Amino acid sequence: MNEAFSEVDGGDLDVLIIADHASAHVPDDVDLGIDPALLDNHIAVDIGVAQVSRLLAHQLGCKAILGGVSRLVIDLNREDDAPGLLPVMSDGHAIPGNRHADLAGRMIRFHHPYHHHVGRLLDGMGSPFILSVHSFTPRLASDPEQLRPWDIGILYNEDDRAARIAIPLLEEAGLKVGDQLPYSGKMLNATMNRHAEGNGIPYLGVEMRQDLVGDAAGQKRFADILGPIVVECRDRLA
């Protein structure tokens, strides 16, 4: 297994599930200088994403690529020159080990292999469709008054084709949907800008609320809802 990513091989359907922040892993030789308990927190990992992505890969019969390290080690959903690649603060928590870390070394070790493999998987598909999976916390410690009532958010930059198909279907499934909420794909869309929008590949970017996918029942619920919608988006945009 490559330390930069893990791959789920559920089959050969031309759908690739991409989960940038699926792991809380910190390699033994990386010292972030934080309480290890924070690795269970949303600042370190998108809670529920790895499990939902695995369920979907097997349900749909497709592949998934899961980021192999915590976003506190390197943020895989950032451009190569973005300031947030090595966070020194996250939701009020200092990450002192990153202040003098070797950014170039971590890029070569984690960021580049991850994105190169995403590119290789897409190159091997005839008519690919991408599902980008993230999750968000219902409340930020640094801004507890900010309400985030959505069950799922849909993110995109310029290409909203799949979003327009998926949003009414998700609402019909009983979910409260945020269109470009709680984040905007105009700002936080680096992986999809690079691999999807940059290559004309249709994609659906979702952000699930973490407290709704924190256990097996919630993970299965979201996978069961998302699976048919992904297929519908893919079929209509193929």
Image (cartoon, rainbow, N blue to C red):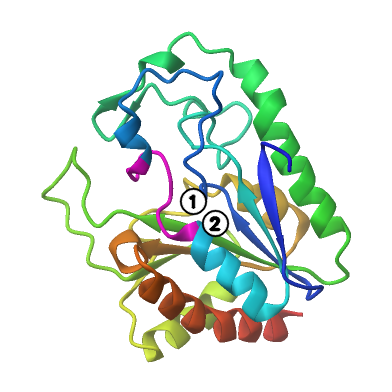
Q: Position of residue 130 (x, y in %)?
A: 67, 65
Nearer to the camera, 73 or 40? 40
| Separation of marks 1 and 2 at Cα, in angstroms | 5 Å
Q: Is the stretch drawn in magenta largely helix, strand or loop?
A: loop
Q: Position of residue 155 (x, y in %)?
A: 48, 61
Q: Secondary structure at mark 1?
A: loop
> Going from the N terminus, do you reach mark 1 or mark 2 first?
2
Q: Residues within 10 Å of mark 1 (few under 14, many from 20)?
A: few
Q: Which residue is mark 1?
A: 186
Residue at 68% x, 56% y is 197
Callout 1 amino acid: Lys
Tell how many labels: 2
Whether label 1 touches label 2, CB < 8 Å: yes
Q: Which residues are magenta?
A: 40-49
Q: Quadrant of residue 53?
A: bottom right
Callout 2 amino acid: Asn
For residue 46: magenta?
yes
